[in-house]
Image (spheres, rainbow, N blue to C red):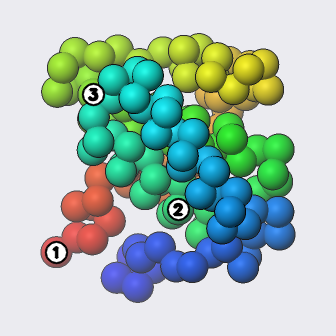
Amino acid sequence: MAKNERKTSDYIHLQPEVTKRSRMMLIDWLIEVQDDLKLTDKTLYLAINIIDRFLAAETITIDEFQCVGIIALFIASKYQETNCRGFRPDVNEFVDYCDGAYERQDGLAMEIRILNRLGWRLSTSEINGP
């Protein structure tokens, strides 16, 4: 993959239903979830990176936007938290923060969609590479 393909571009203009304001609101909400679950800052930063890279590569509807956010936090927590403090993320715990908007299978389907779109590359060192 060429180096410029790995960078997150300004994707908002590519998203017909997602705006800078809706992204800001999603991040604010994810900060609350992160605080409630006592997740590390690294987990939040990775989740935001995952969101931005996914949205730069794939158009979504506004109905999917919150699911993308919470599942990016779920993915990041599996990557960061499991190794550093034995936290075992459960997709149900994350989806429950969406107040019934999504079910377990929606979260799992979004997880696969995000991971496939990102080519299973999660860490920023894999993104930035040598």
Residue closest to the eye, 123 or 64? 64
Label 2 element class: helix
Image coords of residue 48 (percent x, y)? 46, 53
Residue at image mark 2: 52
Label 3 element class: helix
Q: Residue at x 49, y 33 (%)?
A: 32
Q: Look at discs 2 and 1 and give the one toward the viewer.
A: 2
Residue at image mark 1: 130
Q: CA distance from mark 2 to mark 1?
A: 21 Å
Q: Is residue 74 above or below residue 6?
A: above
Residue closest to the eye, 16 or 106? 16
Mark 1 vs 3: CB contact within 8 A: no
Q: CA distance from mark 1 to mark 3?
A: 25 Å
Q: Is residue 43 visible?
A: yes
Q: Tell me the kind of residue under disc 1.
A: Pro
Q: CA distance from mark 2 to mark 3?
A: 20 Å
Mark 1 is surrounded, within 10 Å at the Cα level, by few (under 14), some (14 to 19) or many (20 or more) other residues, namely few
In the rendered view, does 92 fall on the left or right side of 82? right
Q: Look at discs 1 and 3 and give the one toward the viewer.
A: 3
Q: Is residue 119 above or below residue 33?
A: below
Q: Quadrant of the C terminus?
A: bottom left
Mark 3 or mark 1, which is nearer the start of the sequence?
Answer: 3
In the rendered view, does 88 fall on the left or right side of 65? left
Image coords of residue 43 (percent x, y)? 33, 40
Q: Residue at x 27, y 28 (%)?
A: 81
Q: Is residue 97 above or below residue 16?
A: above
Residue closest to the eye, 29 or 96? 29
Q: Residue at x 49, y 29 (%)?
A: 33
Q: Tell me the kind of residue under disc 2.
A: Asp
Q: Tell me the kind of residue under disc 3.
A: Glu
Residue at image mark 3: 81
Image coords of residue 102 (percent x, y)? 76, 25
